[in-house]
Amino acid sequence: MKQPKLKGTGVAIITPFKNGEIDYTSLKNIINFLIDGGVEYIVSLGTTGEAVNLSADECRAVLDTTIEAIDRRVPLVAGLFGSNYTQKLVDGVQRYNLDGIDAIMSSSPAYIKPSQEGIFQHYLRLAEATPRPVIIYNVPGRTSSNVHPETVLRLAEAAPDVFLAVKEAKGDIHQAMQLIKHKPEGFLVLSGDDPITMPMIAAGGDGVVSVIANAYPRAWSNMIRAGLENDLAKARAINYALLDVHPLLYVEGNPVGIKASMEIKGYCSKEVRIPLTALSGNNYARLQAEMQKADEALAKIG
């Protein structure tokens, strides 16, 4: 199984809307903005891409548009593969047209809170079914079930040709370091939590699937590359320039904040779909102010 190069900065790209419909023109413009900004790969239809608020036909159309716009310039990861029902996930992956998709990202089962053995068996069934490599997505804040480091490492050893990385989004630096310390050769530990990405890179992590990189692809990619090259002074400067933007991207939920930031940048509307609502006026003004400070600080770094 061919392993795409996913070290560095991946972007969990938004799905822009306009008057309730997907804004495909803005989507293409954002993809070019990200690639021109130097990101290593794009993750489509994850949490930030609002896949759960799209129909199956819309998800397919977003992927087709994204595949065409990327035009093989960077790898593409599809993030819409998650299910509480293992057999439904397996059937879906086997039926899905994965042409143009380099890897899939799959979150652990939500809501039902399986045991670690259940999580292991769930992913093992996926490994047996998928024709593409898999990023294990641990996001207990949404699934209510933490994938323990021992389970991730067990999967990495059980199917090394399939499981190429974990997107670790628990927000726990100690858990991340356990993964980094014990990971097998070739297995990537990727941050799924932007605010602790820099500490994870400094500890030996391999990269990030980022939200903030939608708005700051060049700065964030430069930070990650500097960290991977042990230029911690440069990485630290960029990290602190953007540090106070992060909380406002999540103050009313994701992708509410990042969509507002992309509107501020002029790339699309802040529009989201119910049950999400667009960022409120007060928080919008706060975000705008912090982004201006960040832009000024980044300009000084060069």
Image (cartoon, rainbow, N blue to C red):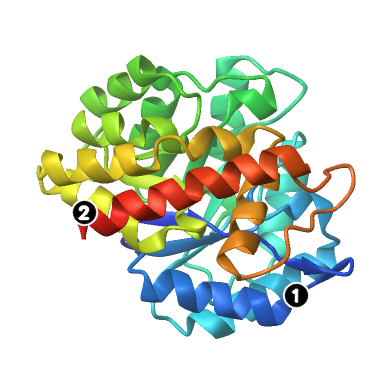
Q: Which residue is drawn at 47% across and 24% down?
A: 171
State whether residue 168 is above or below residue 44.
above
Q: Which residue is drawn at 62% across and 22% down?
A: 118
Q: Which of 297 and 170 is in front in this view?
A: 297
Mark in the foreground, 2 or 1:
2
Image coordinates of residue 264 in percent, x first then y, are 61, 60
Report the Cα–Cα distance between label 2 and label 1.
Answer: 34 Å
Q: Which of 87 and 229 is in front in this view?
A: 229
What's the mark number on residue 23? 1
Q: Helix, strand or loop at disc 1? A: loop
Q: Which of 258 and 80 is in front in this view?
A: 258
Residue 84 makes an appearance in the image = yes
Q: Helix, strand or loop at disc 2? A: helix
Image coordinates of residue 92 in percent, x first then y, are 73, 56
Q: Mark 1 belongs to which amino acid?
A: Asp
Q: Which residue is drawn at 53% across and 69% down?
A: 101
* Quarter the C terminus occupies: bottom left
In the rendered structure, the answer to whether residue 247 lies left or right of residue 271 reads left
Q: Name the residue under label 2.
A: 301
Q: Residues within 10 Å of mark 1 (few under 14, many from 20)?
A: some
Q: Mark 2 belongs to which amino acid?
A: Ile
First in sequence: mark 2 vs mark 1: 1
Residue 7 makes an appearance in the image = no
Image coordinates of residue 149 in percent, x first then y, are 40, 21
- Image quadrant in which you'd find residue 185: top left
In the rendered structure, the answer to whether residue 5 lies left or right of residue 246 reads left
